[in-house]
Amino acid sequence: MTGILPAHAIERLIERKTISLAHPVAKGQIQPASLDLRLGKVAYRVRASFLPGPGVLVQDRIDDLEMHKIDLSSGGAVLERDCVYIVPLQESLALDATLCALTNPKSSTGRLDVFTRVICDGSRAFDQIGAGYEGPLYAEICPQTFPVLVREGSRLSQIRFREEGAGEEDKPVLADYPELLELAKANDTLMHMSGIALSVELRGTGGEDLIGYRAKKHTGVVDVDAPNSCKILDYWEPITSRGGRHLVLDPDEFYILASKESVHVPPEYAAEMVPFNPLVGEFRVHYAGFFDPGFGHSSSGGSGSKAVLEVRSHKVPFILEDGQIIGHLIYEHLSELPRQLYGSDIGSHYQAQGLKLSKHFTP
């Protein structure tokens, strides 16, 4: 079987040491189709982001670029805005020739505007780990908006495993689920049989004028391991529609918006948000792109779940129009049926969400 591995298949990888752990699996670390990655004991402040390239160890590049070392094991440390940090992760891999991996920030990480990518020895690209890789993993972390408190064991990234061969055959995902096909047709967003396009909601929903939030620039620290610890208005400015159908994105500001469409990931699939058009460079949407099986699925309490969009404009002001396409949701089959789905039963934070900030914020 090819495809994305569900949770119980990830457990098998741990049992046979394909995934090695510095500490036992933590509660909730294994998600329906991914594994949360945990920070190790130290963080290295480095001069710049980098990719090691073929034959080069990440640790050797850290030794060249290190400015100072930060202890995360005793109470944690604050990572400052616009600084680059490299943190060895507690998980390492010994992939066989048919298994590759891909990584992404967790949803809460993206909604905090903490730019996080995973690299490995010899890598030519971020967030991609080739089949047959054996070695350690590292997180590159650069907070963009809020300073964040992290510690050993904090989880900012997640990893998915794919049996090689997945994606070579065009799977009839939309044809399998009429509601997805109707959604695509209604919005004229059908692009191919592996996914649909999503657009941005800028008119407000449910009789509310609220369409999003703009992050404040000078705030306190956010503890990434402390849900409901920050007051929304101390960190965010609400944005209302005021009867309009567009939003001007100011350069280098960070916004939380929502999709117009509800997202549905059937139990047999996992999904990922990818850019609508890489040639449109004025803004970046959705830092955290994984959607687990069962997200928005009615049987697991998710009817009506929106995709929350993390948006940042680059260099020039840019006008987003209501209904403008901002990303594609690509579906992939799981390698086997999952035994758990995204939802309240496993403590998922964003099932049945509308416009929603990260779990750290409370009214």
Image (cartoon, rainbow, N blue to C red):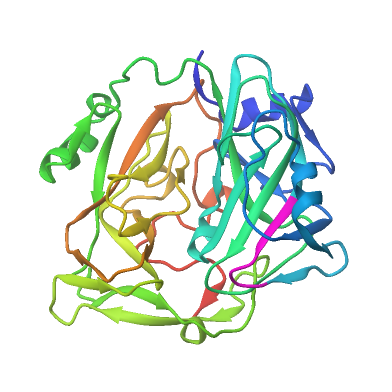
Task: Tell me if 308 is positioned left or right of 341 in this view.
Answer: left
Q: Viewer-proximal residue, 215 or 53?
A: 53
Residue 47 in which image quadrant: bottom right
Q: Residue 110 in the image: x percent, y percent?
A: 50, 59
Q: Against 178, is 80 above or below?
A: below
Furthest-right residue in view? Answer: 74
Work out whether residue 34 or residue 167 is closer to the camera in this orientation and state it: 167
Q: Is residue 124 visible?
A: yes
Residue at 59% x, 25% y is: 100
In the foreground, 217 or 232: 217
Q: Position of residue 68 (x, y in %)?
A: 81, 64
Classify residue 234 as left or right of residue 171.
Answer: right
Taking depth in this image into account, of 138 and 235 the one nearest to the observer is: 138
Determine whether 41 is above or below 121 in the image. below
Q: State the residue at coordinates (54%, 60%).
A: 108
- Residue stretch in magenta: 80-87
334, above or below 355, in the image: above
Residue 110 vs residue 135: left or right? left
Residue sitting at 61 percent across and 69 percent down? 227
The quadrant holding residue 54 is top right
On screen, residue 316 above or below 221: above
Q: How many marks?
A: 0
At which x and y percent is residue 26?
75, 47
Q: Is residue 148 magenta?
A: no
Which residue extends farthest front? Answer: 64
Residue 104 position within the rendered picture, expressed as x and y whole percent measured from the top left: 54, 45
Residue 297 in view in this figure: no
